[in-house]
Image (spheres, coloured by chain):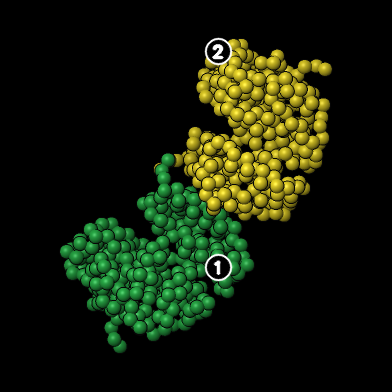
Chain colours: A yellow, B green
Amino acid sequence: MKKYRYAIIGTGAIGGFYGAKLQQVGCDVHFLVHRQAEWEWIKSQGLRLESPLGDFRLPVVNTYNNIHQMPPCDVIIVALKTTQNYLLPELLSPLLNSNSIILLLQNGIGVEAQIADQFGELQILGGLCFVCSHKVGLGHIQHLDYGTIKLGAYHPNHQAAGITEAMKQIAADFNNTGIPIELSEDLWLARWQKLVWNIPYNGLSVVLNARTDEMMGNPETRLLVRRIMEEVVQGAQACGRSIKNSFIETMLDHTDNMKPYLTSMKLDYDAQCPLEIEAMFGNPLRFSQQAGTNLPRIEMLYQQLTFLDHKNRHFQD
Amino acid sequence: MKKYRYAIIGTGAIGGFYGAKLQQVGCDVHFLVHRQAEWEWIKSQGLRLESPLGDFRLPVVNTYNNIHQMPPCDVIIVALKTTQNYLLPELLSPLLNSNSIILLLQNGIGVEAQIADQFGELQILGGLCFVCSHKVGLGHIQHLDYGTIKLGAYHPNHQAAGITEAMKQIAADFNNTGIPIELSEDLWLARWQKLVWNIPYNGLSVVLNARTDEMMGNPETRLLVRRIMEEVVQGAQACGRSIKNSFIETMLDHTDNMKPYLTSMKLDYDAQCPLEIEAMFGNPLRFSQQAGTNLPRIEMLYQQLTFLDHKNRHFQD
């Protein structure tokens, strides 16, 4: 079996972490770095990872600030925020050969379909990262907790695509690094399940300026979180996927047991970065509406976030 | 016809404005002032009103900081925030005779019923103030715009109570001051109508930290305002009152034509005062639920506001 060559599009908290782990166990990894200063730093100093799984440095990495200098790769890992996906047609084309696999390590739902519009002949995978990591400096990633990736294959019309050979080979590479990979036969279900957590906590953390423990500690917002989770389950149902009510209980219990946590959307908001509103809120709403189901609370969150995101990035008063 | 003696409970932006106007045209008015410093100031300096209808001073006013020193009055005007209504049983008793009329100049819905529990044998009126005024200093009220009061009589079970003699006499006194009074045969309908504006703008102004023009200028929040107004109309319908859809258009047009405006709830929030969440959001939700109708967006606003209000007044981090 031929070894995969990996491209990492977006060397941040996600791409930097997983890419460094892959290179550490001997994979051939090529990192695209957007910012000039960071690219120069990584070219001369390499990558540094702090992690409870073990700190390490990679003094030499293959790093690029120009997509056209990168070699064709077998697996293109997209680790950008979904707000930058409009760049993907241009970024992906030079890296692809006819057997390339595109793996989107991104939140939300419906992101694979947009890629499939242009690269539908290729295998497109989605990966859901259950990881807590941050970029804390140039070429410097801090991994705090978790790390599991849930991996599934895209299929048009959101059918369950089963487990492909490529998924198994990628899983083997990741397993070598010690990162657990769960293979999902049904990416669409896996994405809806992740939204059960992401939609209420990411949305409300921005609107209410609140950590997870604050939302859980107030009976009114605790009930609101549950009501929003129920709407996600309704949306999934309308889109042909059944999520049990016990899954909601599991997510609530899990959050009760987490350390006080600021969501990634809240961190983006505080940094005045664009929020992943369309992938995480807009797409599930549109899919549900197409299936004849309205989700009023999620729609209201979408409207509130759109307002706040615009104001946050366009003027301060 | 005997002239009415008026008590003003709460000499702030509302009570101070209307009370001063009544005294200016010769009514016998008695003002209760809560804060010691303000009471001393008004006792020595009187009340001052700035208004596009004409500035004036009242050098001598009947002012009290102890309810037991006030004379019995014919009309007790309650101009407190509804968050202080738990004080009313104690405040009202010493002022009442068997013919006294209680007039609540307050927002929200269901406030008269709470008073009727204790003083059900008296005539209870509700007044909706369409006024823009602020207290800007000790004994100093600034009236900016509008002023109309819509006046109606409370009836148990929310039946339309028609126009009473007392309403006509109070209207005559106010009309002498130049303040327009509209008499409503149906207080319950009038209160639901006012909620069509108050619920979306007051609620969202706090949650989104926004002026009316900002909410109207963003297409997403503009749509959200409309959806929330539609829920108020649904709630009214469930509670036996029909509000036409054209009323929503009128409210939206009216707001488009207003100067950029921070709602009273937003001003309360910024001053870290308790918000009138129960009268304005909790009661309409409960009445609708009792009638079998859920209003998910208003419920979500209620939950968000409860969280923000609690955090705003209990700790800062």
Q: SS for tag 2? A: helix
* Viewer-nearest residue: B310 or A156: B310
User: Is there any visible trace of residue A36 in the rendered image?
Assistant: no
**Residue appearing at x 60%, y 35% in the figure:** A83
**Residue appearing at x 53%, y 46% in the figure:** A217
Look at mark 2 in the image and give the residue it sits on: A45
Instruction: Say if B289 sits above or below B181 in the image.
Output: above
Label 2 – label 1 distance at C-alpha: 66 Å
For the N terminus of chain A, which image quadrant?
top right
Say which chain tag 2 marks: A
**Residue appearing at x 60%, y 29% in the figure:** A145
* Crowd around label 2: few <14 · some 14–19 · many ≥20 (10 Å): some
Mark whose residue sits in front, 2 or 1? 1
Left or right of B236: which side holds A164? right
In which quarter of the view is residue B6 placed? bottom left
Instruction: Say if B29 sits above or below A255 in the image.
Output: below
Look at mark 1 in the image and give the residue it sits on: B287
* Viewer-nearest residue: A297 or A117: A297
Q: Are marks 2 and 1 on the same chain?
A: no
Instruction: Say if A100 sits above or below B207 in the image.
Output: above
Q: SS for tag 1? A: helix
Instruction: Say if B183 sits above or below B41 in the image.
Output: below
In which quarter of the view is residue A20 placed? top right
